[in-house]
Image: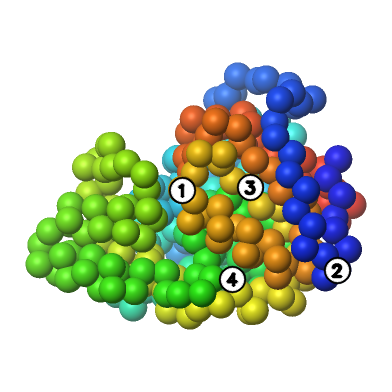
Amino acid sequence: MIQASPPGSTATMVTAFTAHEFRLRSPGTVRPVTITATSADGTPIRATDQGQGPPILIVHPGSSDASSWAEVAARLAYRFRVVRIHRRLYAADRPPPGHSMATEVDDVLAIAKVLDGPLVLVGHSSGAVVALESALTAPALFAGMLLYEPPVAVDRPLGGAALRRARAALDAGRPGRAMAIHLREIVEAPRLSGWRKLRPYAAAQISDDEAMEALGVGLDRYAGLDVPTCLLRGERSPANLRRRSEALAAVLPRLLPGQVLRQQGHAAHLTAPIEVAWAIEDLADAVSRRIG
């Protein structure tokens, strides 16, 4: 059982997974359905809804869509109602004009409000930044939050000059170049194997980066966040993501013990979905008094 740190504590006790009480179940037997909510600007926002029980809302990472978390959702759907939002930035053929973090937050809150909350909010990578901002805006909607390696801007802009070069490459009709800059210079990925398949997401990913960069530098905005939060990271993830998580842990007032996924990186939702489901289940159980 996870125990919350007292307010103001920066304790980040780390647990590495070896065994768990969570039973291995075959995914896919709890069929998902699609639900829709209307965002603040009138745009219909879709989400995939699966299972019954206390609600969990998942915000997927960049350069992907909600289907990337299907395996994790299927493992959890036997105990929980698992909802995966389709981020509008990645649900269309091209990024919507005027994209902003505020729009993403409005979309998340629209879905959250149609669920029986308060709920557990899960965010991954840029989706974890969206989750942070959503919880900051409407903390009463969320009983707890799990963040998987949010790329928060600690002491310098998220992308800076590299992001400007990526935008220039995109505007010049070179999406592959833009994505390579994103991965090599912003994410600081140790290798770029398989990056070509991400080219179709380049326009959305660069808009995603720009929305996060527009939040500014520094983490003081999260020092008053009144939502119990667990930070999840991969043992093999890029070092800069580890540093960002450590800096965020130092300011969160209701920090829960963090968890490290052994021999995993930034894509454990694909390579170790059961272990990711364990971490989410742990959090949901820890805050079960708030979500009934």
Is 209 situated left or right of 134 in this image? Answer: left
Q: Which residue is drawn at 65% across and 20% down?
A: 25
Which one is earlier in the sequence, the residue at label 2 or at label 1?
2
Camera-nearest label, 1 or 4 = 1
Q: Quadrant of residue 147?
A: bottom right
Q: Is residue 209 above or below residue 200?
A: below
**Between residues 162 and 171, which one lies in front from this camera angle?**
162
Q: Which residue is drawn at 33% across and 78% down?
A: 98
| Badge 2 density bin: few <14, some 14–19, many ≥20, Cα 10 Å | few
- Residue, disc 1: 238
Which one is earlier in the sequence, the residue at label 2 or at label 3?
2
**Between residues 208 and 12, which one lies in front from this camera angle?**
12
Q: Residue at x 12, y 59 (%)?
A: 174
Which one is earlier in the sequence, the residue at label 3 or at label 1?
3
Q: CA gap, disc 2 to disc 1? A: 29 Å
Camera-nearest label, 2 or 1 = 1
Q: CA gap, disc 3 to disc 1? A: 14 Å
Assign a secondary structure to mark 3.
strand
Q: Is residue 65 above or below residue 157?
A: above
- Residue, disc 3: 232
Q: CA gap, disc 4 to disc 2? A: 20 Å
Mark linked to residue 133: 4
Which one is earlier in the sequence, the residue at label 3 or at label 4?
4
Camera-nearest label, 3 or 4 = 3
